[in-house]
Amino acid sequence: MNTEVIPHNPFQSMIDRFNAAADILNLSYSKRDKLQHLEKQIVVNFTVTMDDGTEQNFDGYRVIHSTALGPSKGGIRYDMGVNLEEVKALAAWMTWKTAVVGIPFGGAKGGVICDPRSLSKSELEKITRAYTRTLADTFGPDKDVPAPDMGTGPDEMGWLMDEFSKLHGHGKAIPAVVTGKHLNAGGSIGRTEATGKGVSIITLLALKNRHIDHNNATVAVQGFGNVGLHSALYLYEKGLRITAVSDVYTALYNEDGLNIPELILYYNLNNKKIAGYTNAIVISHDALLLLPVDVLIPAAKEDVITCDNAHAVKARIIIEGANGPVASDADEILNQHNVLVVPDILANAGGVTVSYFEWLQNTLHQTWEIEEVNFRLTEILEESFEKVFATASLYNITPRLAAYVIGIKKVTKTMEGKCAVK
């Protein structure tokens, strides 16, 4: 596998951290090589007839990093920035994430290079169905289970399930092939807000770990999509002071704290944008990352904190709501500045955890109430947090390296067990 160092390449960040954890575990070269290689890497191209009658070609990917722990699991992104290095990194992160929280899934990721905001609903449906047909032999409830991600949602997951079922269901729906569906299509209650709720649970645990009273603790949230919005809302409801939020267009700041329910209402009535909200001042996106807050939650994209700005970060705690928001070249700088970083493979694992609940409900033909979903989610995340921080203390390493140590150890032992059985 090519591991040439590319500045702020998300896959290289994963490899850097993987190797640091592998050193701690004294992992052999052959095992490292096995765990760094992808099980499957698929590049697809398909043609869709657009609403105006023209035909347009689309490129996409599906990467399966590992199925050692179970069927591979991972979202599908629709974005112009989708690229193979990003997809590979996200697939590997999912492998370690599911291992850390004890979910019987492996890691995968997919994406289509397109701008979903410029496409009609009928065009998005055609793209989703064409992508599904191309990968119909890869997907499956016991093989590879997609989920929504940037640019996709319950509609796309419903179309994927329907198209897959037409090809493999013999007249019956196969809801367990995908998670993140609408409730009437077999989705789980609590799935939409699961990642943000998980981030808030982890935030409260991190504040307690640092002996910071969560009442009126200050928080800045980068990103006001599904993860950032729900993280901000849950923490606001717990009494934390959300002083700054941002979306792709605007960053807002209010030293006294933003009224998050009011801001969400404005956002929903303003075409999913926070621009123009008057009970705050506008600041730069870069300035939000450097505010003197108790907690910074980067919940937008990869590599927003790098060696270029890490030294200026004033937050006491960083909770990685997004995947890979802190580049590997920033890790040591933040550690030297005593900034506690709770890594993505723990912090944002609420989404895949409730996705597992959805898959399980579909498989067992059950429907759980929200109380059961939230109880199980909280229990898993609290246990995982304690395990990560206990491992960090045992080896005198950062929580990020501890999470990688746990994930790599679990996958390695499972692979060894399977080989022994064979």
Image (spheres, grey):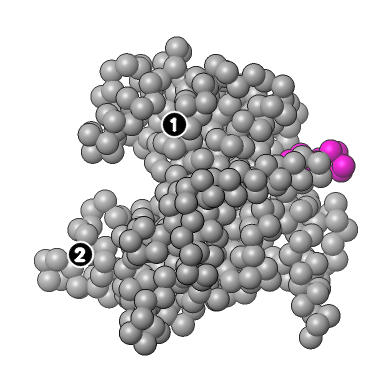
Q: Looking at the picture, tell me which residue is in the foreground, 57 or 388.
A: 388
Give x and y (percent) for residue 149: 43, 55
Q: Is residue 105 magenta?
A: no
Residue 398 belongs to magenta span? yes
State the image coordinates of residue 140 (x, y, percent, origin top left).
49, 76
Q: Amino acid at mark 2?
A: Ser
Q: Quarter-wise, where is residue 412 in the image?
A: bottom right
Q: Is residue 162 above or below residue 313?
A: below
Label 2 sits on a secondary structure element that is helix
Q: Amino acid at mark 1?
A: Leu
Depicted 70 relative to depicted 230: above or below: below
Label 1: element kind: helix
Q: Quadrant of the N terminus?
A: bottom right
Tell which tag, 1 or 2, sits nearer the viewer. Answer: 1
* Residue that appears at 66% across and 27% down: 207
Is residue 401 visible to the viewer in this orientation of the structure?
no
Left or right of 330 in this view: 46: left
Question: Residue beneath label 2, please?
Answer: 122
Res 168 → quadrant: bottom left
Q: Which residue is mark 1?
A: 233
Q: Quadrant of the C terminus?
A: bottom right
Tell me which numbered mark, 1 or 2, is placed earlier along the sequence. Answer: 2
Q: Is residue 415 visible?
A: yes
- The mark found on residue 321 in the picture is none
Q: Residue 40 in the image: x percent, y percent?
A: 57, 75
Q: Which residues are magenta?
A: 392-399
Q: CA distance from mark 1 to mark 2?
A: 32 Å
Expressed as whole percent of the image width and height from the top left, the position of residue 159 reads 31, 68
Residue at left offset 81%, top offset 82%: 421
